[in-house]
Image: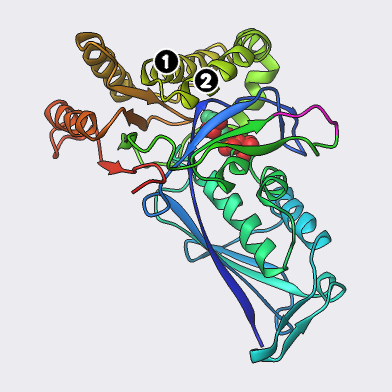
Amino acid sequence: WVFMVTAQTPTNIAVIKYWGKRDETLILPINDSISVTLDPSHLCTTTTAAVSPAFHQDRMWLNGKEISLSGGRFQSCLREIRARACDVEDETKGIKITKEDWGKLHVHIASYNNFPTAAGLASSAAGFACLAYALGKLMNVKEDESQLSAIARQGSGSACRSLFGGFVKWIMGKEDNGSDSLAVQLTDEKHWDDLVIVIAVVSSRQKETSSTTGMRESVETSLLLQHRAKEIVPKRILQMEEAIKNRDFASFSQLTCADSNQFHAVCLDTCPPIFYMNDTSHRIISIVEKWNRSEEAPQVAYTFDAGPNAVLIARNRNAATSLIQRLLYYFPPNSDDLSSYIIGDKSIA
Ligand code: DP6
């Protein structure tokens, strides 16, 4: 017999960034972060986890290609889920797996991203969130989403925020064992459903410096990062929570853009400096800044993760339409600068 479950998890985009760890193994951050979860129909990971007595080792395939599981992160997630596994019984198929059996059985996992892997589109976030969730369901784990988020976190920090829709906060926590470093939902997907997210794919190539390596180097060398984590982010988190609660787009966009720019300033302040944005990213920032200044109120916020792709958050559908017209004007469809626009409403549509 084979017993399997399939889960789908969207990616999330941070509006107050996570950058820097205080514990590399447990993946504990040096500051809180806040993100918005996208609509699962646009950028998501689909994962099937299966168990069978015929499996003789744990194996995993990503986008159809087998990957090595020797890395500690996958093993941490699997170990944490196995430790919480409960009895599973499926009478129709005559399957009965006891708590003790889970320690002896092996799993096969197949995972697909419907967007470029490791191109700065937060694929590890959706990937590890989906892995933790699918394994949790397979093994009948009783933990709630926040507790599962602390397990997903051990796969990739940003993954903990993908267990919820809407706006999500990752609380950094204080404990050395990471038990209080988990995600909580701030507002659900219906709270601010005017927002429309457009992703301008500047490059779908794999990034040169991974987030993991980049943030390690920033922690080791950037004084600006220390200042950011201690003095700037705690205040910004409170302001951002207030802006989200009040659906105050002017404050939201000011904080989002400022935080993205500070994160990239930290990358420049790292030794050797890290360049995630390119000329096209900079042009997009200028276009949005100029446009926002020419209107009575800001229309669009921009944010860039560890790559050149722009995540643009429009205040409503009209602003999103106007944004796309502007992008098409500055970057005609056959230009080399932008490879595509992904329209990813946050989890509302
Ligand atoms: C710039 O979660 O990919 O997207 O924890 O080492 O796996 P690891 O890093 P990862 O870093 C994400 C960094 C970011 C900002 C963010 O998502 O908050």
Note whether 175 is above or below 84 in the view shown. Answer: above
Numbered badge on residue 20: none
Residues under numbered marks 1 and 2 in contact, where contact means CB atoms less than 8 Å apart: yes
Q: Determine if the magenta segment contains residue 82.
A: no
Q: Judge whether residue 175 is colored magenta.
A: yes
Residue 332 is situated, as x and y percent measured from the top left of the image, at 13, 33
User: Which amino acid does the dot numbered 1 rest on?
Assistant: Ser
**Amino acid bearing label 2:** Glu
111 sits to left or right of 21: left
> Cβ of disc 1 within 8 Å of ligand 1?
no
Determine which of the numbered discs, if any, sits on residue 242 in the image.
2
Find residue 106 and report its horizontal and vertical position in percent. 74, 73
As drawn, is 1 to the left or to the right of 113?
right
Q: Which residues are magenta?
A: 172-176
Q: What crowding class fits label 2: few (fewer than 14 Cα within 10 Å), some (14-19), or many (20 or more)? A: some
At x 37% / y 16%, what residue is drawn?
250
Q: Quadrant of ligand 1?
A: top right
